[in-house]
Image: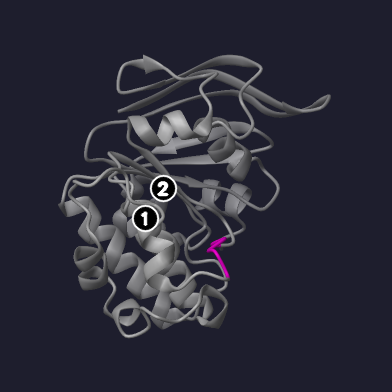
Protein backbone atom coordinates (compact mmCIF):
# COMPACT_ATOMS: atom_id res chain seq x y z
CA UNK A 1 0.00 0.00 0.00
CA UNK A 2 2.76 2.45 1.03
CA UNK A 3 6.54 2.16 0.76
CA UNK A 4 9.17 4.73 1.74
CA UNK A 5 12.73 4.16 0.57
CA UNK A 6 15.66 6.14 2.01
CA UNK A 7 13.58 9.31 2.50
CA UNK A 8 15.47 12.49 3.42
CA UNK A 9 13.49 15.64 4.19
CA UNK A 10 14.82 19.10 4.98
CA UNK A 11 13.49 22.40 6.29
CA UNK A 12 15.90 24.78 4.59
CA UNK A 13 19.31 23.38 5.54
CA UNK A 14 17.96 21.49 8.56
CA UNK A 15 18.16 17.76 7.79
CA UNK A 16 15.07 16.41 9.61
CA UNK A 17 14.40 12.95 8.14
CA UNK A 18 17.60 11.02 7.57
CA UNK A 19 16.99 7.92 5.49
CA UNK A 20 13.53 6.63 6.46
CA UNK A 21 12.57 3.26 5.00
CA UNK A 22 9.27 1.62 5.97
CA UNK A 23 6.14 0.09 4.47
CA UNK A 24 2.44 -0.39 5.20
CA UNK A 25 0.69 -3.43 3.74
CA UNK A 26 -3.00 -3.52 2.77
CA UNK A 27 -5.18 -3.71 5.88
CA UNK A 28 -2.23 -3.14 8.22
CA UNK A 29 -1.82 -0.63 11.05
CA UNK A 30 1.74 0.60 11.43
CA UNK A 31 2.55 2.87 14.37
CA UNK A 32 5.31 5.48 14.60
CA UNK A 33 6.47 6.22 18.13
CA UNK A 34 8.99 8.71 19.45
CA UNK A 35 9.50 11.69 21.68
CA UNK A 36 8.54 15.20 20.62
CA UNK A 37 10.69 16.85 17.98
CA UNK A 38 12.03 13.62 16.48
CA UNK A 39 10.49 14.05 13.01
CA UNK A 40 7.16 12.23 13.26
CA UNK A 41 4.99 15.03 11.88
CA UNK A 42 7.61 15.77 9.21
CA UNK A 43 7.29 12.13 8.16
CA UNK A 44 3.54 12.57 7.66
CA UNK A 45 4.09 15.84 5.78
CA UNK A 46 6.61 14.14 3.51
CA UNK A 47 4.17 11.36 2.64
CA UNK A 48 1.11 13.55 1.94
CA UNK A 49 3.17 16.08 -0.03
CA UNK A 50 3.24 19.16 2.22
CA UNK A 51 7.03 18.91 2.58
CA UNK A 52 8.29 16.64 -0.21
CA UNK A 53 11.50 14.68 0.40
CA UNK A 54 14.66 16.07 -1.12
CA UNK A 55 16.00 12.54 -1.60
CA UNK A 56 14.47 9.07 -1.60
CA UNK A 57 11.17 7.71 -2.89
CA UNK A 58 7.59 7.44 -1.67
CA UNK A 59 5.41 4.86 -3.45
CA UNK A 60 1.65 4.50 -2.95
CA UNK A 61 -0.36 1.67 -4.52
CA UNK A 62 2.46 1.12 -7.00
CA UNK A 63 2.90 4.78 -8.05
CA UNK A 64 5.94 6.92 -7.32
CA UNK A 65 4.23 9.87 -5.61
CA UNK A 66 7.35 11.59 -4.24
CA UNK A 67 6.66 14.88 -6.03
CA UNK A 68 2.87 14.72 -6.26
CA UNK A 69 0.83 17.61 -4.78
CA UNK A 70 -1.43 16.69 -1.85
CA UNK A 71 -4.69 16.89 -3.83
CA UNK A 72 -3.45 14.14 -6.15
CA UNK A 73 -2.63 11.96 -3.15
CA UNK A 74 -6.21 12.33 -1.95
CA UNK A 75 -7.58 11.54 -5.40
CA UNK A 76 -5.44 8.38 -5.41
CA UNK A 77 -6.85 7.27 -2.05
CA UNK A 78 -4.76 8.78 0.75
CA UNK A 79 -6.17 10.88 3.59
CA UNK A 80 -4.64 12.77 6.52
CA UNK A 81 -5.96 13.36 10.02
CA UNK A 82 -3.61 16.23 10.94
CA UNK A 83 -2.10 16.98 14.30
CA UNK A 84 -4.21 19.63 16.02
CA UNK A 85 -7.45 18.54 14.23
CA UNK A 86 -7.70 21.68 12.01
CA UNK A 87 -11.41 21.49 11.44
CA UNK A 88 -13.10 24.37 9.61
CA UNK A 89 -14.20 26.53 12.53
CA UNK A 90 -16.91 28.47 10.67
CA UNK A 91 -18.53 25.40 9.07
CA UNK A 92 -21.02 23.09 10.72
CA UNK A 93 -20.27 19.44 11.38
CA UNK A 94 -22.33 18.51 8.32
CA UNK A 95 -20.52 21.07 6.14
CA UNK A 96 -17.09 19.95 7.38
CA UNK A 97 -17.93 16.41 6.33
CA UNK A 98 -19.66 17.18 3.04
CA UNK A 99 -16.90 19.49 1.81
CA UNK A 100 -14.52 16.52 1.93
CA UNK A 101 -16.74 14.17 -0.06
CA UNK A 102 -14.79 12.55 -2.88
CA UNK A 103 -17.26 12.24 -5.76
CA UNK A 104 -20.87 11.19 -5.31
CA UNK A 105 -20.26 7.55 -4.52
CA UNK A 106 -18.00 5.86 -2.04
CA UNK A 107 -17.88 3.54 0.93
CA UNK A 108 -18.05 6.43 3.38
CA UNK A 109 -21.19 8.53 3.41
CA UNK A 110 -22.50 11.11 5.85
CA UNK A 111 -24.87 8.61 7.57
CA UNK A 112 -22.07 6.06 7.91
CA UNK A 113 -19.67 8.56 9.49
CA UNK A 114 -22.37 9.69 11.91
CA UNK A 115 -23.03 6.06 12.78
CA UNK A 116 -19.34 5.63 13.60
CA UNK A 117 -19.39 8.83 15.69
CA UNK A 118 -22.85 9.13 17.30
CA UNK A 119 -21.79 12.27 19.20
CA UNK A 120 -21.32 14.09 15.90
CA UNK A 121 -24.84 13.12 14.91
CA UNK A 122 -26.11 15.01 17.95
CA UNK A 123 -24.12 18.10 16.89
CA UNK A 124 -24.51 17.99 13.14
CA UNK A 125 -25.62 21.65 12.96
CA UNK A 126 -22.98 22.94 15.38
CA UNK A 127 -20.06 24.90 14.00
CA UNK A 128 -16.56 23.50 14.32
CA UNK A 129 -15.49 26.09 16.88
CA UNK A 130 -18.38 25.10 19.16
CA UNK A 131 -17.22 21.49 19.55
CA UNK A 132 -15.11 20.06 22.36
CA UNK A 133 -11.59 18.89 21.61
CA UNK A 134 -12.74 15.28 21.48
CA UNK A 135 -15.60 16.11 19.14
CA UNK A 136 -13.24 18.05 16.88
CA UNK A 137 -10.97 15.01 16.73
CA UNK A 138 -13.90 12.80 15.75
CA UNK A 139 -14.80 15.34 13.08
CA UNK A 140 -11.24 15.39 11.75
CA UNK A 141 -11.27 11.60 11.42
CA UNK A 142 -14.73 11.62 9.86
CA UNK A 143 -13.71 14.32 7.38
CA UNK A 144 -10.74 12.19 6.27
CA UNK A 145 -12.97 9.14 5.86
CA UNK A 146 -15.36 11.12 3.64
CA UNK A 147 -12.62 11.20 0.98
CA UNK A 148 -13.01 7.39 0.81
CA UNK A 149 -9.35 6.53 1.50
CA UNK A 150 -7.44 3.29 1.16
CA UNK A 151 -4.68 4.63 3.43
CA UNK A 152 -5.31 6.83 6.46
CA UNK A 153 -2.48 8.89 7.95
CA UNK A 154 -3.24 9.79 11.58
CA UNK A 155 -0.96 12.29 13.34
CA UNK A 156 -1.35 12.25 17.14
CA UNK A 157 -5.12 11.61 17.18
CA UNK A 158 -5.30 11.33 21.00
CA UNK A 159 -3.23 14.43 21.77
CA UNK A 160 -4.84 16.46 24.56
CA UNK A 161 -7.81 14.12 24.98
CA UNK A 162 -9.26 12.82 28.24
CA UNK A 163 -8.82 9.06 28.92
CA UNK A 164 -12.43 8.28 27.99
CA UNK A 165 -11.99 9.92 24.58
CA UNK A 166 -8.63 8.22 24.09
CA UNK A 167 -10.45 4.89 24.43
CA UNK A 168 -13.06 6.10 21.93
CA UNK A 169 -10.36 6.91 19.38
CA UNK A 170 -8.84 3.49 20.00
CA UNK A 171 -12.22 1.87 19.35
CA UNK A 172 -12.56 3.71 16.06
CA UNK A 173 -9.05 2.75 14.89
CA UNK A 174 -9.71 -0.90 15.75
CA UNK A 175 -13.01 -0.81 13.85
CA UNK A 176 -11.40 0.76 10.79
CA UNK A 177 -8.70 -1.90 10.93
CA UNK A 178 -11.33 -4.66 11.00
CA UNK A 179 -12.83 -3.15 7.86
CA UNK A 180 -9.49 -3.47 6.09
CA UNK A 181 -8.34 0.16 6.03
CA UNK A 182 -4.55 0.63 6.00
CA UNK A 183 -3.40 3.08 8.68
CA UNK A 184 -0.10 4.81 9.45
CA UNK A 185 -0.46 6.09 12.99
CA UNK A 186 1.77 8.58 14.81
CA UNK A 187 0.94 8.31 18.48
CA UNK A 188 2.37 9.17 21.92
CA UNK A 189 -0.03 6.99 23.90
CA UNK A 190 1.95 3.75 24.10
CA UNK A 191 -0.82 1.40 25.34
CA UNK A 192 -3.22 2.54 22.61
CA UNK A 193 -0.54 2.46 19.93
CA UNK A 194 0.50 -1.09 20.76
CA UNK A 195 -3.07 -2.34 21.13
CA UNK A 196 -3.98 -1.56 17.50
CA UNK A 197 -0.64 -1.92 15.69
CA UNK A 198 0.62 -4.76 13.55
CA UNK A 199 4.10 -3.23 13.40
CA UNK A 200 5.91 -0.50 15.33
CA UNK A 201 8.78 1.85 14.42
CA UNK A 202 10.50 4.24 16.82
CA UNK A 203 11.77 7.49 15.35
CA UNK A 204 14.64 9.33 17.01
CA UNK A 205 16.41 12.37 15.53
CA UNK A 206 15.02 11.67 12.09
CA UNK A 207 16.01 8.02 11.95
CA UNK A 208 14.24 4.74 12.66
CA UNK A 209 16.09 3.26 15.63
CA UNK A 210 13.83 0.30 16.39
CA UNK A 211 11.32 -1.80 14.44
CA UNK A 212 9.37 -4.74 15.80
CA UNK A 213 6.01 -6.28 16.53
CA UNK A 214 4.11 -4.64 19.41
CA UNK A 215 4.67 -7.53 21.82
CA UNK A 216 8.41 -7.43 21.23
CA UNK A 217 8.57 -3.72 22.00
CA UNK A 218 6.43 -4.14 25.10
CA UNK A 219 8.95 -6.69 26.43
CA UNK A 220 12.00 -4.57 25.58
CA UNK A 221 12.52 -2.37 28.63
CA UNK A 222 15.83 -0.96 27.41
CA UNK A 223 14.39 0.39 24.15
CA UNK A 224 11.29 1.81 25.86
CA UNK A 225 13.38 3.57 28.48
CA UNK A 226 16.01 4.90 26.07
CA UNK A 227 13.82 6.17 23.25
CA UNK A 228 10.37 6.66 24.79
CA UNK A 229 11.16 7.54 28.40
CA UNK A 230 8.93 4.73 29.62
CA UNK A 231 10.07 2.96 32.78
* Depicted 150 relative to depicted 125: above or below: above
Q: Is residue 146 left or right of residue 129?
A: left
Which mark identifies residue 217? Answer: 2
Magenta: predominant secondary structure element?
loop
- Name the residue furthest bottom: 122
- The foreground one among 104 and 223 is 104
* Depicted 31 relative to depicted 192: above or below: above
* Depicted 44 relative to depicted 217: above or below: above
**Image point 65% across, 33% down: which residue?**
206
Is residue 86 within the magenta segment?
Answer: yes
**For the N terminus, which image quadrant?**
top left
- The foreground one among 127 and 156 is 127
Residue 227 placed where, x, y %?
Answer: 61, 47
- The foreground one among 158 and 102 is 102
**Image point 54% across, 62% down: which residue?**
85
- Label 2: state its secondary structure: helix
Is residue 148 within the magenta segment?
Answer: no
* Depicted 224 relative to depicted 95: above or below: above
Colour scheme employed for the rendering of this structure:
one colour
Residue 10 placed where, x, y %?
Answer: 73, 26
Magenta segment, which residues? 85-89
- The foreground one among 157 and 86 is 86
Q: Is residue 149 left or right of residue 42?
A: left
**Image point 16% across, 53% down: which residue?**
178
Residue occupied by mark 1: 194
Tell me the mark number nearer the camera, choosing from 2 and 1: 1
Residue 200 placed where, x, y %?
Answer: 41, 42
Q: Are marks 2 and 1 in contact (CB under 8 Å)?
A: yes
Quarter of the rendering containing residue 93: bottom left
**For the C terminus, which image quadrant?**
bottom right
Amino acid sequence: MLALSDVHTYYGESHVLQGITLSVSPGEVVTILGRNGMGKTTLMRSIIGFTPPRRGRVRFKGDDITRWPPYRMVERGMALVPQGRRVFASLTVRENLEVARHGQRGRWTLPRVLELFPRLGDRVQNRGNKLSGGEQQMLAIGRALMTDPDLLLMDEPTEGLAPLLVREVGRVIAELKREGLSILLVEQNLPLALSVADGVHILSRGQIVHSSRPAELMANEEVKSRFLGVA
